[in-house]
Every structure is written in structure tokens, then in C-alpha cells.
Amino acid sequence: MLTEFVERIRSAHAANTPLVIQGGGSKTFYGNADEGEVLSTRKLAGVVDYQPKELVLSAHAGTPLAAIEALLAEQNQMLAFEPPHFGDAATLGGCIAAGLSGPRRPYAGAARDFVLGVKIIDGTGQPLHFGGQVIKNVAGYDVSRLMVGALGTLGLITEVSLKVLPKPAAETTLQFELDEAAAILRMNQWAGQPLPLSATSWHAGLLTLRLSGAASAVHAAQARLGGEPLQDAAAFWQRLRGQATPFFDKRPSTLNQNLWRLAVKPTTPPLKLGDAQWIEWGGALRWLASELPAAALREAARQAGGHATLFRGKAPANGAFAPLAPALATLHRSLKQRFDPSGILNRGRLYPDF
């Protein structure tokens, strides 16, 4: 399979023919529209190595994400960044290329933090290997993490090595009836205290808090915070992680609303951009279903110390992702030129001119 990929990319590079790298296709909605022939990684599947005692797993890019999580669950381990699947076909390569993380991200780390090494084929058809398969790897500049969130624009990911973590010994979820401003304040107050937080969520007047860790710590925190225990907690967080709730079902085709993802300072007060929103990550992530112009939303996010990304819907003329500052744009183009000089890989997916 690797030989086939190398030959296909070399041929496309020589002919300047764009290619669309695709695994399960579960995240095709994310980013800008790309162009070219589909290069599927689904057949490049299978776990290469798994060492539960070393907390390290390596697998090919086309390996189903569900299969990896099932394998880890057998050893009572997990992908701590809780990657969203958005469908049964989600693959490891797509998970890393998209770089998306779930509810546990601010407390355990992002997808990028768990990548130990990658193998890729760059835009000229050259196989490359970055990083390693051990947690204490300090072999120079961490190029492997550049692939996280690059949406396949720097290379076709063929193999990924990840750090995994044990599942927490105990876990409970509490709910509190609070308005938006009070919920943001409470989340930030709790973040500065020695509490075993692992997820926070606010929507429609209800703040939901997950506690994870040693049983004694979880029980002590629960007694201290109060709130109402949520009985179907695992299902709640799974639905939020996969955006399988009515809020996230709002689509441009049905309600003429786009779904925006605003990353801001956690202490940012209510943005007052509309009633339809969901808050995660202790206040740092604001989901917004909105008809407002992209420029207005991005300016609001900028003033709050962050940025706004169109997550689902029709991308504005300057793209789904916030435009880069000139210095960052130059750096991005330099990396693109190095890894994909002809610009054939997922052309336009990250930025319209990229």
C-alpha cells in the first residue's frame, strides 16, 4: 500500500494534479472545499504496536478510531483528548489531521500533546518519519506535531504513535441551574481550585461538570460542590463529544444558520451574539449557531482574545478559518512549500490560497 501511495503522489506532483486525502470521510464538512481526485487511506489499516505498560500505541492512518478505542478499553485505557468521531467511519489519520479534541481537552491536553511520532508521505512522494515511539523523546524539533490540525495539507499521514492514559478510577457528573454569566464565573473559580475536573459544559441554563480521578478525590469534590448527579452521564458526554444533540443539528440547509466555534479567554463574559450557544472548556470554547456575518463574529472573538472558525456551513470568501497575521501566514506558506511544493495535497482545505 505504501508503494502505491508513493507512486500516486509522485505522479500527481509531476503532473500538478491535486489530490484529496480522505480516510472515513467523517470530517469532510470541516474546513474549506478542496479539489482533486480522492486518495483513500481506508485500506492502510491495523494496529502496528501496542504496549499497555508503556502507554504507547502505534497504528496505520486508516485504522478505525472506534477499533482503537475498543482495544484500549480492554486494558482500561483511553485516548485522553477524547477525539470526536462524527460517524462510525472515523479513522486515526483523520483524527490527527483534523486535530480536534473533546470535552477533556483543557484538563488532559489536546490531540497534539499526545502525538509521539508520525510517518508521512510528503507532496513530492517522499516517505518521511518524525518523532518516535517513546514518551521521553527529545529528538530535535517536533515536526510530527505540525501534522496535527494541518488537514492533510503537509503530507499524507501513514502511521501515528500516540501516548495513551489509564481511565480514571472514579468519575461522576454534577449539574447546576445557572445563567450564562454565573456559569462562566463558577467554571473559572473551580478551575483555580484543587478539584479533579475533567469536563465542563453550559447550555440553556444548565451547567454540567464532570469529576474524574481517585475515588476519594471525586467523592470529596462532590460533597464540597453539591449539585445534582447526572445518571446517564456517559451518554451525555458522548453525545456532546460527537455533537449528537439537537443544538448541533442546526444546519444551514434547515435553519439558515452556520455553526461557529469561538476560542476565547475562559474569563470572557457572555458575548451576547445570540441565544443559541453552547459553552465548553471552562468558558474557553463557545459554540454558536448564528446567521451573523463572519466579520462580526471574528471581530467579537478577536476582542475576546481569540478567534472564530466556521465549523459547519457555507464558508465566507476568506475561508472557514480566521485569516492569519502576516508573519504567521509567511511561516505557513514556507512550511507548505517545503512539504508540498506543487500544492497538490488537499488544495485549499486549510486556507483558500494554501
Image (cartoon, helix red, strand yellow):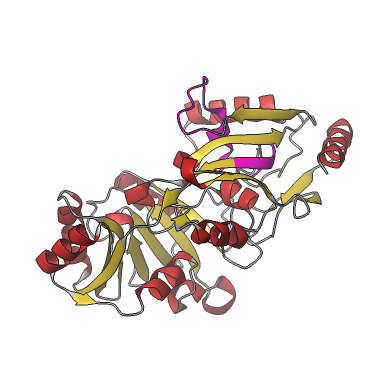
In x, y percent, where is residue 76? 45, 58
* Quadrant housing the C terminus: top right
Front-most of residues 274 and 205: 205
The answer, for residue 16, to whether it is visible in the render is no
Residue positioned 51% across, 75% down in the render? 249
The answer to whether residue 140 is magenta is yes
How many marks overall?
A: 0
Residue positioned 71% across, 45% down in the render? 346
* Quadrant housing the N terminus: top right
Residue positioned 61% across, 28% down in the render? 130
In x, y percent, where is residue 81? 44, 52
Q: What residue range appears in magenta?
A: 134-160
Above/below status of 344 relative to 328: below
Main secondary structure of the magenta stretch: loop
In x, y percent, where is residue 94? 63, 51
Above/below status of 88 relative to 3: below
Residue positioned 52% across, 22% down in the render? 141
Above/below status of 22 relative to 177: above
The answer to whether residue 138 is magenta is yes
The reply, left or right, for residue 118 in relation to residue 266 is right
